[in-house]
Image: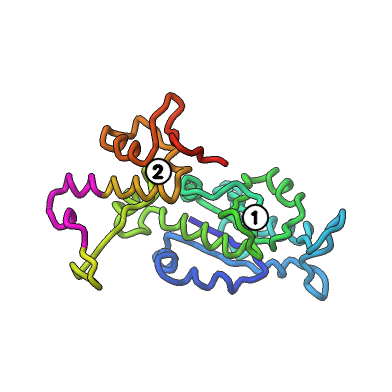
Amino acid sequence: MRMDIITIFPEYFDPLNLSLVGKAREAGVLDIRVHDLRAWTSDRHRTVDDTPYGGGAGMVMKPDVWGRALDAVASGADGGDRNDASGPEPQLVIPTPSGRPFTQEMAAELADEPWLIFACGRYEGIDARVAEDAAMRMPVTEVSIGDYVLNGGEVAALVITEAVVRLLPDVLGNPESLREESFADGLLEYPVYTKPLSWRGRAVPDVLLSGHHGNVARWRRDQALHRTAERRPDLIAELDPADLDEHDRAVLADLGWVVQPTGLVHARRSVAH
Ligand code: 6GU
């Protein structure tokens, strides 16, 4: 996979040389290029923003600078070896708090793309015409990583990059851990333990030492159901009742969740207030 990241803070992306992402780059599975947006400014002060039409606080990033940057990067002209129009089409990802919520499902979709371009703006945003204009030539997705405000898209681009890269073939050592982790089955992960058996007076649950794989799997499933009901009732409401066995239904019923024709419903409180 190729990734191009356009930002006024290239140093934000130094961590992409570390750990799993760094190894993927060394192994040649991943080609990441970070570009300084100011390379496409034309004035002496290398200006990237201006005041908003209609008034209001903060600054808006200029369309002309972004337009030149995206034209150059998407054409492969900027240090690329993909000047060939027959090559893959890039998908543009614009991190913004007003984007679609980033999910594991979206990470998996992006991991199937051959080429992603990230356009990192400051949080007041990029002139809206930039995304509209880019969409004439490539798929564009505006993405939010959560309901809170960051100063710019850089940290969000790092988050999205890490979530995507670990799904690439030949990046994660053990693909089992992809299937077992949170969200794969719509539930949070169960608690995990390692040695020592007793630590600060706290024992590892007996069932995990039993060697009985069926009981271990059942206990983990119960823990996942309890945790999810406690921390993420919105995820319980999204479960498909067809995926729940009798034992699951009994555990959930204990927690107040009942299967109705419309799906799972909490008997004592509604999820959305
Ligand atoms: Cl993607 N960008 C910014 N600037 N703030 C955010 C965000 C993105 N997602 C949540 N907050």
Q: Is residue 77 visible?
A: no
- Residue 217 sits inside the magenta stretch: yes
Which residue lies under the disc numbered 1? Answer: 96
Residue drawn at x 62%, y 44% as measured from the top left: 139
Within 8 Å: ligand 1 and the Cβ of disc 1?
A: yes
Residue at figure coordinates x 29%, y 36% from the top left: 250
In-front residue for pair 241/28: 241
Q: Which mark is residue 41?
A: none
Q: Residues within 10 Å of mark 1 (few under 14, many from 20)?
A: many
| Quadrant location, the C terminus | top right
Q: CA distance from mark 1 to mark 2?
A: 25 Å
The image quadrant of residue 28 is: bottom left
Name the amino acid, label 1: Thr
Magenta stretch in the rendered image: 204-219
Secondary structure mainly formed by the magenta segment: helix
Q: Counting other residues with Cα less than 10 Å from the Cα at mark 2, is it few (<14), some (14-19), or many (20 or more)?
A: some
Task: Single out the residue that lies furthest toward the front.
Answer: 268
Judging depth in this view, the residue of 147 and 205 nearest the camera is 205
Q: Is residue 33 left or right of residue 42?
A: left
- Residue where numbered disc 2 is placed: 186
Residue 38: x percent and y percent?
A: 72, 69
**Residue 39 versus residue 60: which sits nearer the camera?**
60
Q: Is residue 184 visible?
A: yes
Q: Is residue 225 left or right of residue 15?
A: left
Q: Seen from this angle, which residue lies furthest left? A: 211
State left or right for residue 49 relative to residue 30: right
Q: Is residue 187 above or below residue 3?
A: above
Q: Please state the horizontal and vertical placement of residue 65, each as a whole percent of the image.
A: 76, 62
Q: Residue at x 68, y 61 (%)?
A: 121
In this view, the residue in front, 258 or 57, is: 258
x and y, in percent, of residue 88 in the image? 55, 48
Q: Position of residue 187 (x, y in %)?
A: 38, 46
